[in-house]
Image: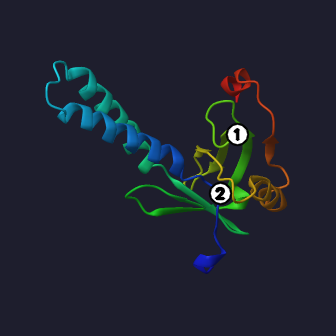
């Protein structure tokens, strides 16, 4: 399958990254300002925001095509999963992305283990198209387009 047939469904959270970088630069500027008595609070803020920023930059990129589901993890090889191996796609109460909640996708890995991944959808491609493609390949897939939060504990 050519590379251009992949459709990205995960968000890059660019605005959130820019906000965190701006706050880190601002706090660093305050640290470097002459006459600052207490710097430990700003150092703690910079470290915490730096860790969150690291998490944001190392999130997995998720793609799909008409036959496959692709997970590209940071510093690892791409994982290819046939759409037939996806067993559930459920809306999650946790997480947010431009007014949309996150989705939890469960699938069978190469060694038949059930694994899951949380997807924060991007706003440029319709996540419902991904769900339809999965339903076409696996009519027995479990989908849930609603969530009240507590139901995630029992899945």
- The x and y percentages for residue 14 are 51, 51
- The x and y percentages for residue 89 are 73, 45
| Image quadrant assignment for residue 66 | bottom right
Q: In this view, does 72 lie above or below 59?
A: below
Relative side of 117 to 27, left or right: right
| Image quadrant assignment for residue 111 | bottom right
- The x and y percentages for residue 85 are 69, 56
Res 69 visible: no
Which of these two is toward me, 116 or 75? 75
Q: Nearer the N terminus, badge 1 or badge 2? A: 2
From the image, tell me which residue sits under label 1: 99
Q: Is mark 2 on a helix, strand or loop?
A: loop
Q: Residues within 10 Å of mark 2 (few under 14, many from 20)?
A: many
For the N terminus, which image quadrant? bottom right
Q: Which mark is residue 150?
A: none
Q: How crowded is mark 1: few (under 14 residues within 10 Å), some or many (20 or more)?
A: few
Q: Residue at x 38, y 37 (%)?
A: 23
From the image, tell me which residue sits under label 2: 9
For the C terminus, which image quadrant? top right
Marks 1/2: CA distance? 15 Å
Relative side of 88 to 73, left or right: right
């Amino acid at each position: 399958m050519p590379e251009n047939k992949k459709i990205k469904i995960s968000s890059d959270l660019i605005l959130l990254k820019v906000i965190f970088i701006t706050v880190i630069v601002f706090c660093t500027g305050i640290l470097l300002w002459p006459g600052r008595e207490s710097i430990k609070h700003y150092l703690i803020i910079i470290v915490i925001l730096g860790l969150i920023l690291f998490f944001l930059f190392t999130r997995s990129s998720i793609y799909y095509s008409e036959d496959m589901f692709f997970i590209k993890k940071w510093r690892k090889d791409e994982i290819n999963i046939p759409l037939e191996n996806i067993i559930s796609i459920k809306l999650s109460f946790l997480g947010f992305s431009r007014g949309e909640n996150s989705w939890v996708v469960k699938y069978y890995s190469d060694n038949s283990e059930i694994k899951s991944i949380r997807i924060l959808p991007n706003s440029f491609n319709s996540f419902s198209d991904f769900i339809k493609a999965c339903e076409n390949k696996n009519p027995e897939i479990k989908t849930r387009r609603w969530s009240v939060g507590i139901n995630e504990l029992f899945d």
